[in-house]
Image (cartoon, rainbow, N blue to C red):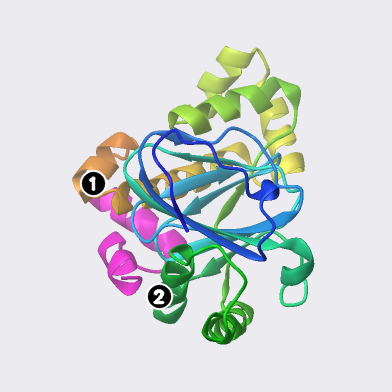
Amino acid sequence: MAILKQNESFNADTLQEKVIGIASDMVLHDSGFHFHKTKSQLLYAPSGCMTVTTSDRQLVLPPFRMLWIPAHKVHRVNFRNIVAYRSIYFDEDYSQKYIKPDMKVLHVNALLKEIIERICFWEWSALKNDQTNLLNVFWDEMQRAPEEKLELTMPQDRRFKRTVEEWTLRHSMPPMLKDLAEKTGAVEKTISRIFKKETGLSYQDWRQQWRLQRSIELLVEGNSIGEVSHILDFSSDSAFIEFFKKHTGSTPLQYLMAHE
């Protein structure tokens, strides 16, 4: 078990145990881009919201989602408000027996939530019989967990890659297409063509997906509908609610209550 302090360093690759759990309450965290050589990682927060960025994707992890990160996958974890950080590292050879080495976001049910919490507060040692039994339940639930698909593909074109990374790190609102064209010096048609080719979405649709991800973060952090509507530049609260329902199938409050 490790309860990490805010800026305490930790390297799971230096440890030999098959299963290593850590826990921390942190704020304003930026892990920087990194990867784990010998360990796969399960990343989860029972409260708060994390943003994870890879070379080509951005993912949002509210309390009802967890992220499986295989060894060698470069990633970066960011959050601004207080997050109850939970991370479990698994020896790569051990975890491959149970789960494919693919990065994926999975839904966290009540049972998985309790098991993750228990593992994160285990002492680091050889696994005891009761721990092995609990891990068997864990892997069974992991294999059954529905995969969540809310992610944002990041453009790779050098004219936009750094700009988009700045939006991500600063949580800055992506500008309208005409404003982005003025800032970058690229014509609107060129921007639209590049985003469609590299992300599968037009710039306008990509921007809307960004707003959806950010709205989930803001709601989980405790912001009101009015505050989220203002931060994300919606014309009214009702416009934001309609937008959110169109993309998720439920109102913001229904969405949060369904995942409590």
Q: Residue at x 70, y 57 (%)?
A: 16
Camera sees residue 19: yes
Residue with the mark numbered 1: 223
Q: Residue at x 39, y 61 (%)?
A: 63
Asked if the residue at tag 1 contacts the one at tag 2, i.e. Cβ–Cβ closer than 8 Å, the answer is no
Q: Position of residue 241 (x, y in %)?
A: 30, 56
Q: Position of residue 206 (x, y in %)?
A: 57, 43
Marks 2 and 1, how far apart at CA: 27 Å
* Magenta part of the chain: 237-260
Q: Amino acid at mark 1?
A: Asn
- Does 252 lie within the magenta span? yes
In which image quadrant can residue 118 be found?
bottom left
Q: How many marks?
A: 2
Lower sequence index among marks 2 and 1: 2
Q: In the rendered view, does 142 fall on the left or right side of 108?
A: right
**Element under disc 1:** loop
Residue 136 drawn above or below residue 5 = below
- Of residues 42 and 107, the one nearer the viewer is 42
Q: Amino acid at mark 2?
A: Glu
